[in-house]
Amino acid sequence: MSFLGHFQIFLFLYALLLLSAQSRKTEHDTESSDDGAEGQRWAVLVAGSKEYENYRHQADICHAYQILRKGGLKDENIIVFMFDDIALNPKNPKRGVIINRPGGEDVYQGVPKDYTGEAVNVENFLNVILGNKSGHGKVVKSGPNDNIFIYYADHGATGFMSMPTGEALYAEDFIKVLERMHLLKRYKKMVIYIEACESGSMFEGLLKTNLNIYAVTASNAKDSSYGIYCGDTYPPSPPEYNGLCLGDEFSVSWLEDSELHDMRKETLKQQYQVVKRRTRSSHVCRFGSEELLNDYLVSYIGTNPENKNFSLAALTASQISNLSLVNTREIPLLYLQKKIQNAPVGSPERQEAQKNLIDEMNHRKQIDQNIIEILRVSLNQTNVLDLLTSTRTTGQPLVDDWDCFKTLVKSFKNQCGAKMEYGMKYAGALANICNMGVDVKQHLHRQGNKTQTFFWFPSILSPFLGSQDTAAYTSASIERSAMSLRINLHASYVSPDISLAFVVATEMTLLVHFGVDELPG
């Protein structure tokens, strides 16, 4: 063959190599838009809880960070919110280490501490995704050709999700910010994954389909979400974790799926189908722009080069057994029960865990009674049990009057002591009050001048604790447990027999059972 022939073959092979390299770059990067302009990938990861018992949320978020980094996203384009009180917590059996599954690798190492402690709040989160410099750290500096991925793991309730400090993130406020981002052309496409109880209510009837936003939630507007890799389940968390859940069912499903496959070949729709099939205890839902379903995951979370030979057909994450799941609202009880089992009889650790378990159980009983009376008095109805769990039909937002709903939620939390782990499962019942036309602000204003402060002392606590539970408390511990309540006293609600009095209390209506002959104070 002549020199010219060899040269032509060389040019042909060289051109093929260039074409192949460019194709791989486009597949791996996928940072070029349809119109040819280059864009960037951004990710915001939020663990919306604190305290060691909520280990799983920060474990999920740290795991997601590791996947994004291996997928090619840069640290400057990943923004992490987490209270950061888990890894070095004295209760952590592996100090400085966080794992997301039994025997798993450390997912905490290298995670940037962009927003920690008090900085993990709604104001900073919304400023970050809007690109507003809040003075605390990085923000999303995205433009019209950029893709954004948001992953939020947290406690949730109908219509909102918690933050470790400050106000909750309400669905209405979140949607308004997303719509503003769209108006300002702060992104090209956006994908949102949410792990929380009743997380479908964050988008149901609210997220428009023309915003180029695709959202997936761990549950619908009514379901709880579930923890995984807990004690006494299969596979269990190591015994030294005292039954603590290392992850969440929905989160582990998408995280482990992303670890296994080449994200250049798996679409959002394919991952949704895998995660929906694998998440068996809650109803995984999707909302928003279905045009994004055929996008490859690499466009949002990248892909690990080590997985380039893997495919959906070749390897699929194992099915999760129902035996491995715990309702997230029961996780604090499971943790305390395991601590009692594992602590020596008579030890201070066992006594403290027993006291905390009794306190939590009685708090839950009180919340159950409170919400029923709130519904009865607010709606002037006697049969209200159906309103505890009922919500609007699919496709409708939780509530129309969000100011009414926010007022009730804040009152229920602040005055009744309702916590995200349990009490706020009744948020849908509060929404029903607003949907039935109760003028909450006028009601609260009317009650405002009729307050009187009372105190609960040991003799008053005994009906709540029961005789054998009361005996477990020392007088000093009961003194420390004495609570002050602001009570709106209404004579029309007090029976002649004051020992059986039902007193409407707090800014709204709180049912208090007094097991004494006269009111204290």
Image: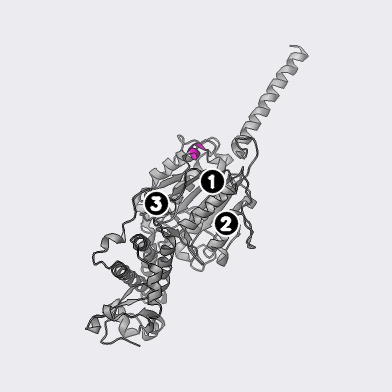
Q: CA distance from mark 1 to mark 3?
A: 20 Å
Q: Upstream in the sequence, badge 3 or badge 2?
A: 2
Res 190 label: 1
Residue 144 spot, x, y in % from top left: 61, 44
Q: Which residue is mark 2?
A: 80
Q: Nearer the viewer, residue 310 or 302?
A: 302
- Which quadrant of the view contains residue 25? top right
Which structural element holds mark 1? strand
* Residue range corresponding to the magenta coloring: 291-296
**Residue 416 left/right relative to 77:** left
Residue shown at 51% from the left, 54% from the top: 176
Q: Is residue 106 visible?
A: no
Residue shown at 44% from the left, 40% from the top: 316
Q: What amino acid type should be assigned to the residue bearing mark 3?
A: Ser
Mark 1 nearby-residue class (10 Å; few <14, some 14–19, many ≥20): many
Residue 320 spot, x, y in % from top left: 38, 47
Q: Quadrant of the N terminus?
A: top right
Mark 2 nearby-residue class (10 Å; few <14, some 14–19, many ≥20): many
Res 258 label: none
Q: Is residue 268 visible?
A: yes
Q: Nearer the viewer, mark 3 or mark 2?
A: 3
Res 219 label: 3
Q: What amino acid type should be assigned to the residue bearing mark 1?
A: Met
